[in-house]
Image (tube, rainbow, N blue to C red):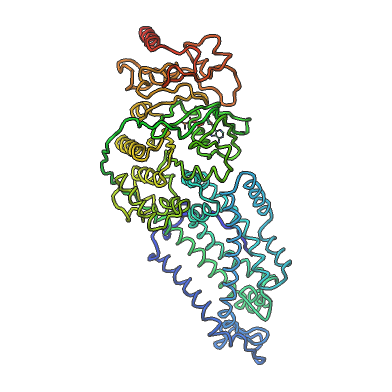
């Protein structure tokens, strides 16, 4: 008896497994699969009708006959024709296998997919439950439950469903975990979609294909397992019969007449192979659906605008701290961030890798990873104190007032859903906008980001678009709710320079037209200086300088900002001289050393810097710096000239 847990077949993983799967249903293997499945389907439907009577008709004069021309497989102990019984048992053998697999798959997939949408503790509990269930061998579980439920087809089906459910749960958990960490799930969470909607709209469609393939293959295994249970006397009971029972009865006389035992065995293997081949063919078909992307990039040159006049704050954050538990101890990558964004303002957030930019953005969007703890001195979004809202109210406020754009436009969309579905789901869920109206809105947004194709584009799937097109769709989707704040985490990093410019133009268009504030996270200092109104410079988990973007090149006062700017080729540096690098390493996010986080790398440090943390203080109404000895512009240039002379 074989009872295997379903294996995690994925379209890509199985794509290379056989040439037949790659070449489709018209190949010899495809034709064989269709013929085998077709013959099983015909026998399942017509077998009992055509041969049912002959199968049940006893003949005392022909008991236990060997195969003859009138009884090709011989007869049983009541003289019934074994070939007729074999053929008419097809549906009784296949139906329970399909039912057991579907029941087990439904239970397992439900359990496994829940792990993608529930919170940390519930997820750990579910994971532990799945591990516990998997600890018991499926075969023993099936036999135990078959005995518990009582011998019979119903009991065997339930037992098998219970036995195969943990395998499905584990596969689903693994597949769903990959989905849970994707940008499109983060985006969907920002949109405030409820758990059941996340599950049904984003998780399950995304993993449906591999699950379907596994279910198909598992049906073959279930057929073998059910036949095994019948063989052991725990499955179908006389006078009913399936292939397993016929095999068991045939074994009694296998040494004198092998055919009555071999024929049901062949039928079982035949059906199991047919299901296996079906799984292979479906996997191959799924792999072929991953098509190359199109690459059309029409030029975009919308007008640029200056800083908007509006001055009301969309977001105010004071003393944001984020702590993350790790195996090495608690990490504190964000250590007191203070920032504010005005309506229609584009603010750049720059800093070395690991300075805490992304975690700051995730904390603002309420998307921190499980276990992370964020604390705030002040946290006001759209004038409302976040602490005064329930979690649900806050989610809703974020869903309607904030959108996120991620670095990788490929992962920002659920690849299994059409662009139109993803663009319209937030307005439909939160504003109860009718479908047709939501589609019209989506079309208008696509037009706004200069994407041709209208309804055709809405019907397409993310993989059919180029990276630049996907990022433009991401901006169009983010604008659907007319959010007050867009957090764009390195939205141009994965794109080439021409497309980067187009994306920046679009973001400018959004903030100009909708007065949307944009927090623009980037490593590209030159781009930030060029595109943003203000720049926040982050180092060691804090904001060390807040200054107008046009002052970044020459007016920065924090030594770190100046060194960061000096390391960029085309801002204030002389190309005839080697670029400046910042010696030393960023501070350890686990560390608890006092003082300025930059003091051990700072050429201008004084004694106080090692013991006292400087706070962000205003130099003028538009310029703040966290430094005990802010540089004067001349002082920095003097220093650089000295260094260059030494070199
Ligand atoms: N889930 C996590 N668990 C533990 N540490 C983390 C986690 N996420 C981020 N960190 C750590 O927190 C620090 C800040 O990470 P963050 O991603 O915010 O930096 P960043 O400034 O955005 O860097 P980059 O520019 O490279 O994206 C890094 O040292 C990182 O290793």
Q: Position of residue 125 (x, y in %)?
A: 66, 48
**Residue 611 picture quarter:** top right
| Residue 49 drawn above or below residue 642 | below
Residue at position x 64%, y 91% in the image: 59
| Residue 376 drawn above or below residue 436 | above
Q: Nearer the viewer, residue 572 or 82?
A: 572
Q: Position of residue 87 (x, y in %)?
A: 55, 79
Image quadrant for the N terminus?
Answer: bottom right
Image quadrant for the C terminus?
Answer: top left
Q: Position of residue 523 (x, y in %)?
A: 41, 29
Q: Nearer the viewer, residue 163 or 233?
A: 163
**Residue 328 picture quarter:** top right
Q: Is residue 151 visible?
A: yes
Q: Where is residue 20 in the image (x, y as percent from the top left)?
A: 42, 60
| Residue 572 drawn above or below residue 239 | above
The reply, left or right, for residue 471 in relation to residue 125 is left
Q: Which of 636 and 294 is in front in this view?
A: 636
Q: Is residue 16 visible?
A: no
The image shows a total of numbered marks equal to: 0
**Residue 224 picture quarter:** bottom right
């Amino acid at each position: 008896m074989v009872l295997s847990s379903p294996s995690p077949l994925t379209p890509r993983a199985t794509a290379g497994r056989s040439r037949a799967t790659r070449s489709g249903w018209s190949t010899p293997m495809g034709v064989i699969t269709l013929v085998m499945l077709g013959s099983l389907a015909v026998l399942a439907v017509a077998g009992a009708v055509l041969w049912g009577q002959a199968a049940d008709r006893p003949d005392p004069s022909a008991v236990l006959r060997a195969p003859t021309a009138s009884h090709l497989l011989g007869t049983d102990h009541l003289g019934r024709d074994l070939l007729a019984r074999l053929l008419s048992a097809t549906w009784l053998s296949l139906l329970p296998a399909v039912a057991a697999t579907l029941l087990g798959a439904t239970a397992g997939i439900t359990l496994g997919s829940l792990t993608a949408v529930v919170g940390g503790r519930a997820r750990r509990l579910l994971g532990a439950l799945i591990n516990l269930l998997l600890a018991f061998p499926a075969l023993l579980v099936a036999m135990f439950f078959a005995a518990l439920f009582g011998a019979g087809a119903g009991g065997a089906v339930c037992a098998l469903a219970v036995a195969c459910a943990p395998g499905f749960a584990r596969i689903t958990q693994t597949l769903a975990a990959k989905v849970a960490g994707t940008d499109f799930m983060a985006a969907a969470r920002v949109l405030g979609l409820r758990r059941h909607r996340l599950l049904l709209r984003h998780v399950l469609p995304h993993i449906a294909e591999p699950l379907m393939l596994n279910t198909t293959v598992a049906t073959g295994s279930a057929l073998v397992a059910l036949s095994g249970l019948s063989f052991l006397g725990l499955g179908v009971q006389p006078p009913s019969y399936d292939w397993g029972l016929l095999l068991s009865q045939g074994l009694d006389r296998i040494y004198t007449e092998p055919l009555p035992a071999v024929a049901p065995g062949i039928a079982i293997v035949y059906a199991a192979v047919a299901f296996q081949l079906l799984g292979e063919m479906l996997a191959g078909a799924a792999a072929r659906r991953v098509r190359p992307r199109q690459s059309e990039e029409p030029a975009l040159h919308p007008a640029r605008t200056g800083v908007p006049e509006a001055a009301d704050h969309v977001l105010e954050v004071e003393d944001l701290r984020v702590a993350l538990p790790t195996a090495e101890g608690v990490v504190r990558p964000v250590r007191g961030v203070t920032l504010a964004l005005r309506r229609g303002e584009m603010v750049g957030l720059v800093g070395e890798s690991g300075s805490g930019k992304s975690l700051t953005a995730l904390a603002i969007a309420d998307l921190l990873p499980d276990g992370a703890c964020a604390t705030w001195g002040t946290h006001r979004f759209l004038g409302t104190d976040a602490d005064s809202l329930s979690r649900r109210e806050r989610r809703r406020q974020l869903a309607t007032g904030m959108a996120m754009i991620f670095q990788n436009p490929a992962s920002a969309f659920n690849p299994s859903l059409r662009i139109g579905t993803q663009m319209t789901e937030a307005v439909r869920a939160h504003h109860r906008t009718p479908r047709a109206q939501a589609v019209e809105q989506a079309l208008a947004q696509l037009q706004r980001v200069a994407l041709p194709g209208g309804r055709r584009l809405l019907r397409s799937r993310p993989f059919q678009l180029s990276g630049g097109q996907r990022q433009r769709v991401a901006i169009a989707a983010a604008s659907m709710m007319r959010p007050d704040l867009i957090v764009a985490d390195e939205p141009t990093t994965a794109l080439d320079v021409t497309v980067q410019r187009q994306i920046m133009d679009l973001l400018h268009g959004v903030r100009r037209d909708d007065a949307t504030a944009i927090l623009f996270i980037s490593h590209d200092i030159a781009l930030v200086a060029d595109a943003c109104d203000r720049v926040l410079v982050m180092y060691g988990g804090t904001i060390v300088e807040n200054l107008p973007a046009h002052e970044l090149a020459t007016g920065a006062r924090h030594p770190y900002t100046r060194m960061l700017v000096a390391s960029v080729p085309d801002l204030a540096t002389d190309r005839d001289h080697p670029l400046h690098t910042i010696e030393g390493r960023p501070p350890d996010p686990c560390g608890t050393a006092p003082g300025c986080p930059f003091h051990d790398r700072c050429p201008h440090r004084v004694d106080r810097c090692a013991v006292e943390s400087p706070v962000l203080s205003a130099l003028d109404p538009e310029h703040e710096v966290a430094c005990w000895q802010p540089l004067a512009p001349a002082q920095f240039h003097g220093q650089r000239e000295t260094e260059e002379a030494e070199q």
